[in-house]
Amino acid sequence: MPADVPVDEQAGLRNDAWLRWYWLWDLSFAVVYVSVGLLVLLRDDDSLPNRLGAAGVLTVMAAGYVFFGRGHIVVPRERGSVQGRFFAAGLVVPQLVAVTFDGDASFALFALCPLMFMSLALREAIIVVVALSLVPPLASLIRDGLDTALGLLGPMMVFTVLLGVTMGTWIHRIVSESQERAELIMKLEESREEVGRLSREAGVAAERARLAAEIHDTLAQGFTSLVTLVQAAESELDRDIEKARGHLTLAARTARENLTEARALVAGLTPTALGTGSLDEAIRRQLERFAEETPVSVSYRADGDSVTLPTVLEVVLLRMVQESLTNVRKHSRATEVTITLQVKETCASMRVTDNGAGFDPDEPADGFGLRGMRNRAAEVGGRLSVRSGSGGTTVELEVPR
C-alpha cells in the first residue's frame, strides 16, 4: 500500500475485504427473515392476531438490524462494547416477544446467532445463544403444557444449541483473525514507513558524506594549491618577476581545473581527470602538477592494465593519490614520494610512500583526509592501511575488482 495514502483511506482499504463479502450476511439475514415471516403468516393452526404480532415483531427486528445493527457491525470496534450489547439487547427482547406470539418465530435464531457473535464477546455470545435456544421450549411450556415442552427440550434444543455455538465460534474466530491480520498489516505499513524514513535519512547522510569527500578531495585541495601558489608568487614579486609570473600561471591553471571540478561535481559526473583518459594518465597529470608546485621528487610505476578497471574503482584510487599528495605537501616535509599501481586479476592496489617525518596513525585527527579515504575504500569493499614512523609514511589501498 502506498505510504502517501491518507490514514482514513488506509483504514478503508484494510476493511475492504470484510465489506466486500458482508453482503452474504445481509442475504442470509434477508432469507431467514422472509422465510420465518412466511412460515408464521401462512400457518393455519394458530390465531391470526398471534401470527400478525410475531410477524410485526420480526419486522421490527429486521428494521433494527438494517438501520442500526448493520452500521455497528461493519465499523471495526472491540466486540463486547456498549454499542454491541445495546444492539444485542435490541434483538433479544423482540425475539422473546415474537416467540411468545408464535413458536415458529424461534427459527429466526438462524439469523440472530451470528449477529450475537459479531456484536458480543465470545463468552457473552455463547451465554446469550444458549439462553435464546431455551426460549422456545420455555414458551411452549407456558403456552402448551409440559408434554409438548418436553418434546422440544430433547434433540431439537440440543441441535440448535450446538449449531449456534459452533457456527458462532467459527464466526468469532474468523472475525478475530481478520482483525489480527488488519492490525498486522497496519504494523507492517508503519514499519515500512519507518524503514522508508530511515532509508531516506541514510541516503541523505550518505549523499552528504559523498559530497563532503568530493569537495575535500577536489575543491579544498585546489584552493590549498591556489593559496600556496599565490603566496609563492607574492614572495617572488620583488626578486624574480619571471618566477612569480610562473607561479601565477600555475595558479590560473589550478583555478580553471577547480572550476571544472566544481561543475563536474554539480553535474554528478566522474572526476574530470578521468573524463579525458585512463587512470594511469590521470595519475601522471596529478604528478606533473605536483612536481610543478613543489620541489618534492616523485616516481611512479604501474603494473597491469588499469584500463580494465571499473570507473568507480578508478575514482577511489585517484582520490587516494590526490589526498596522499596533499598530505605530503602539507604535513610530511618529505623530499621523495613513490607511487605504485598494481592491477591483478582479482584486485587492484595503490601504494604511496614518502620519506617524511611521519605521524601516529592511531592518534585522532581533526582532518577529513584519512577518514575520507577509509570511507571511500569501505564503499567499494576495499581496505586502507597506513604505516608511519620517523622514516616516512606508506598508505596502501586495495580494492576488489
Image (cartoon, grey):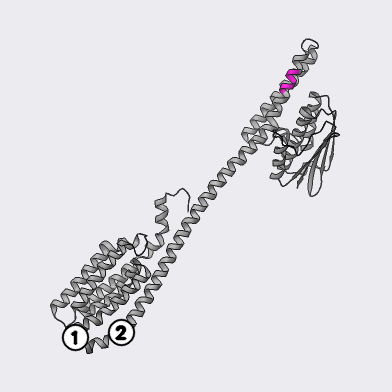
How far apart are labels 1 and 2 at the CA level?
17 Å
Side (left or right) of 154 relative to 378 = left
* Magenta region: 226-231
Q: Name the residue located 49 percent from the left edge and 54 percent from the top edge.
A: 189
Q: Residues within 10 Å of mark 1 (few under 14, many from 20)?
A: few
Residue 352 seen anywhere in this rendered image of the structure: no
Q: Quadrant of residue 213?
A: top right
Q: Nearer the viewer, mark 1 or mark 2?
A: 1
Q: Name the residue located 80 percent from the left edge and 28 percent from the top edge.
A: 288
Which residue is identified by label 1? 144
Q: Are marks 1 and 2 in contact (CB under 8 Å)?
A: no
Q: Name the residue located 39 percent from the left edge and 56 percent from the top edge.
A: 12
- Mark 1 or mark 2, earlier in chain: 1
Kindly identify which numbered label has been placed on residue 156. Answer: 2
Secondary structure, mark 1, is helix
User: Type of residue at label 1?
Assistant: Asp
